[in-house]
Image (cartoon, rainbow, N blue to C red):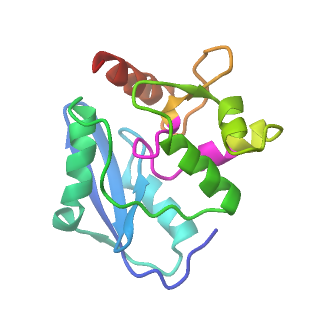
Amino acid sequence: MTIKNSGPVYWTLLSTEDWRMHVAATDEGLCFVGSRNQPLEELTLWVNARFSDSILIRDDDKLRPYAAELAEYLQGTRERFTVPTLLRGTPFQEAVWRALCDIPYGQTKSYSDIAQHIRKPAAVRAVGSAIGANPILITVPCHRVIGKNGSLTGYRGGMEMKSKLLQLEQKSD
């Protein structure tokens, strides 16, 4: 889904302890949280595909509130995010992403749990695809989705990042 006439996309590099990730927002809200330790190219490819007519502008000051909340989460001092987000996908993707936001901190759900939650119990594979397309890692907590048997499953940010995020939430309990 490409968004036309969306204005600039602002970005910053969040760097805290052993976490480095690119974060981006429009004037409407947070639109992208990158994978851990990935180059700027991850963000530029995503912006070029989704915001084709937008320019990408580094603006550390504008992104400070977003980066601050993410840093607090990564340090174990924040469980909920209050910054505005811009979720733009298909209606199905957006339903899945909203369902992810309903998973409480420190808990996990299965793909079939999410499919049930959105009242599409037969759409487990489509739920997995929508989760894989989630552009806002951490804030839209797709890392909290695991296999029905309790196993860790795929994650756009990589399995190491998913494991670290789940461990972080368990330590905070």
Position above or below: 34 against 17: below
- Residue drawn where x is 39% and y is 28% of the image: 165
Q: Which residue reaches farthest right? A: 122
Quarter of the rendering occupied by the N terminus: bottom right
Assess whether residue 71 is covered by the magenta stretch: no
Assess whether residue 133 is covered by the magenta stretch: yes
- Residue drawn where x is 39% and y is 78% of the image: 55
Say whether residue 93 is left or right of residue 166.
Answer: right
Does residue 103 appear in this view? yes
Q: What stretch is highlighted in magenta?
A: 129-142
Position above or below: 164 against 53: above
Q: Is the magenta stretch mostly helix, strand or loop?
A: loop
- Residue 71's spot in the image, x, y percent? 22, 41
Say whether residue 9 is left or right of residue 152.
Answer: left
Residue nearest the observer in this picture, 13 or 135: 135
Q: Quadrant of residue 66?
A: bottom left
Q: Which residue reaches farthest bottom? A: 5
- Residue drawn where x is 61% and y is 16% of the image: 151
Q: In which quarter of the image is residue 9?
A: bottom left
Residue nearest the observer in this picture, 43 or 96: 96
Say whether residue 74 is left or right of residue 109.
Answer: left
Position above or below: 60 against 54: above
Position above or below: 137 against 2: above
- Residue 119's spot in the image, x, y percent? 74, 44
Disc tally is: 0
Quarter of the rendering occupied by the C terminus: top left
- Residue 157's spot in the image, x, y percent? 48, 37
